[in-house]
Amino acid sequence: MTFPYKWQVVAMLWWIAFFNYADRQAIFSVFPLLEKEMHLSPVELGLLGSSFAWTYGLAAPLAGNIIDRIRRKSAILGGLHIWSVICMATALSRNFRHLLFFRAAEGLGETFYFPASMSLVSDYHGKATRSRAMGFHQTSVYIGTIAGGFFAGLIGQHYGWRWSFVVFGGLGIVLGFFLQRFLVEPERGAADRAEGLVREIRMPLAEFLRIIWGTPTALLLMGAFLCSNFVAVVLLSWMPKFLYDKFHLSLAMAGFTATIYVQLASMCGSPLGGWMADRLRARTPGGRIFVQALGLFCGAPFVALCGQTQSAAWLIVALAAWGLFKGIYDANIFASVFDVIRPEARGTAAGFMNMVGWLGGGGTAPLVIGYISQQSSLSFAISLAAVVYVAGGLLLVTAAAVFAHKDAAL
């Protein structure tokens, strides 16, 4: 049986996103080795996570704007090669400044991927299958995070932390050359043109900014993404060290445990969230957003439990439940905003989403949690992140109930 090409595209992008997240997750599993070798403080470890997010977020609007003007295939594969080379170069680090530089540089390479890939997927998949396509693609994030967390810890445990970056970066370069032949650039706006929705091909940045400012749904979705990304980065950056210190797991098992339950549960939640959103979107313009709000509200108690429980068994339950609801939210991150943004500006919109989410959320989370843990405890700092999830859920309910109907009709 041969799958339609539009689903083959999602499968190819799946592997690229796999390495996108494996590369960025790898460093968190070797935090204890870096802490010991370079005598790093919790704040310095937090800065390693934040430096990636700051560069990723700052460059995201420019990357998104560029994506709307060039071949997305070139941006996707070129970005894969660039961040893979930088990942390998991280192994050359000899002190904290070197690590900080390479982490920031990797963020610059990776920032082009999601605006380009989500824009490309939206041209192969119209409203009827868009959430499911993006939900399936999202599962690569979870598997990549598991692989980065476990294998970086395992390789670091046996061969030293530098080899983790060499292996992941090298495999990414090989993948890029392989996919060059098979990935095809679609006509921009193809899926929406078939539905009679495309009005023009390119949009000036000034016009885009006016549209965003006049689209409350998009602004609220960006605010909710900031909140969601804050919580996600808290757990993904600090959970391996939390398990290593509190439950005395090995590096490999700490990295594995911190990712496997969350990510496998998210793999179930993401397709489910995509299916729910496609069904509910057919009934109401705010359907996808209501599904996202459900994910954040239901996930908040389990985020709090992750930091407070003294039981390894309950920690696993909390991680799995949080992951399930995280997946329900994640499946619709870009599909929801694409409901209120025209096709010719979707790359730029995705770039702005990433800027807000990674500067305001991912960029602050590792550093804030590092500081709070230094003043109090890592357990308390992790639990406190649940409040941020609730705030994001409130923003989403407001968007879906008050603004989505009007903004989706524009």
Image (cartoon, rainbow, N blue to C red):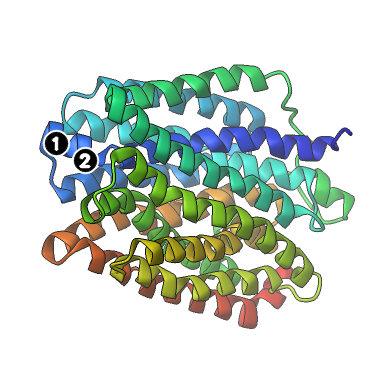
Q: Quadrant of residue 74?
A: top right
Compared with 52, 213 (above or below) is below
Amino acid tagged 2: Pro
Q: Which residue is mark 1?
A: 36
Instruction: Examine the rendering and report whether any part of residue 206 can be seen.
Output: no
Looking at the figure, which quarter contains the C terminus? bottom right
Of the pair 273 and 63, the residue shown nearer to us: 273
Residue at coordinates 59% horizontally, 26% vertically from top-left? Answer: 77
How many numbered marks does the figure carry? 2
Residue 265 percent location from the top left of the image: 55, 57
At label 1, the amino acid type is Lys
Position of 271 relative to 318 (above/below): above
Residue 307 visible to the viewer: yes
For image coordinates 14% across by 67% down, the residue present is: 376
* Local secondary structure at mark 1: helix
Q: Does 176 appear above or below 124?
A: above
Residue 114 placed where, x, y %? 56, 43
Which residue, given by chain and number where applicable, does mark 2 sit on? 32
**Is residue 393 left or right of 331 when viewed as pictured?**
left
Are the two marked residues, 2 and 1, in contact with CB atoms closer than 8 angstroms?
yes
- Classify residue 251 as left or right of residue 18: left
Tell me the quarter of the picture where residue 109 sits: top left
Label 2 to label 1, Cα distance in Å? 6 Å
Q: Percent from the top left, x then y, of residue 27?
A: 32, 37
